[in-house]
Amino acid sequence: MVRSDAGSSEFRVDRSISSRVGVYRGGVRIEAGARPVDVPAFREAVVAAGAVPRAPVPLTISPADPWDLRLLGDAIELGLHLVELQRGFRSQVAGRSGLGPLLARALPGGFRPRLVSSLLSRHGPGDVLLALALAARVASTGTRSPAALAGDLLTLRTAGRCGSSSWPSSAWPRRRSSISSPR
């Protein structure tokens, strides 16, 4: 059974061999088996054979999905634009050394060069640039540090849950108004 938060939720249930519950706004509680799971906005959970996962995962977003386009069209458009910027940046800095200190100085958010260099040793330069820029923008109106947010974004990206059009989706729930699509 799926229960929503006070009627203000937008969610979907896809059924096949298993059931996937994806939440776009608000939250839902899935009650199956012995343990319920709460699924907040921009997360999903798959129930298979009555088994509920321990925790929801980031919502899988696809530009080809009508639900995603209707409810997250702006985020998808922004994500596609960010991927273009990422590719361009990656080609411009290919083989360049000293990128960590350069990015730390160039971006807002007070990132330490050592942190940026560490991120660059584990992730591509385009991914790091986008994570730092999004984290600085989102953190400017919140309580979390830009460094913590950048780490979270890169963790989601590495886990394969942020597809090419999903870059902003992990930042979207809390600060939707602070990220705008370039026009």
Image (cartoon, rainbow, N blue to C red):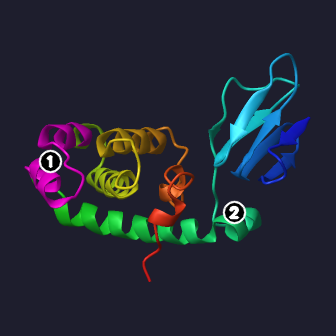
Label 1 sits on residue: 100
Q: Type of residue at label 1?
A: Gly
Residue 95 seen in the figure: no
In this view, the residue in front, 109 or 169, is 109
Q: Is residue 118 above or below residue 89?
A: above
- Can residue 108 be found in the magenta stretch? yes
Instruction: State the residue at coordinates (50%, 56%).
Output: 175
Q: Is residue 152 left or right of residue 162?
A: left
- Which quadrant is home to the N terminus? top right
Q: Which residues are magenta?
A: 97-119
Q: Is residue 76 left or right of residue 123?
A: right
Label 2 sits on residue: 68
Q: Position of residue 155 (x, y in %)?
A: 43, 38
Which quarter of the picture shows residue 8? bottom right
Q: Position of residue 178 (x, y in %)?
A: 45, 64
- Which quadrant is home to the C terminus? bottom left
Which residue in the rendered view is the most extreme toward the right?
A: 1
As measured in the structure, the alpha-carbon distance from the residue carrying label 2 to the one carrying label 1 is 35 Å
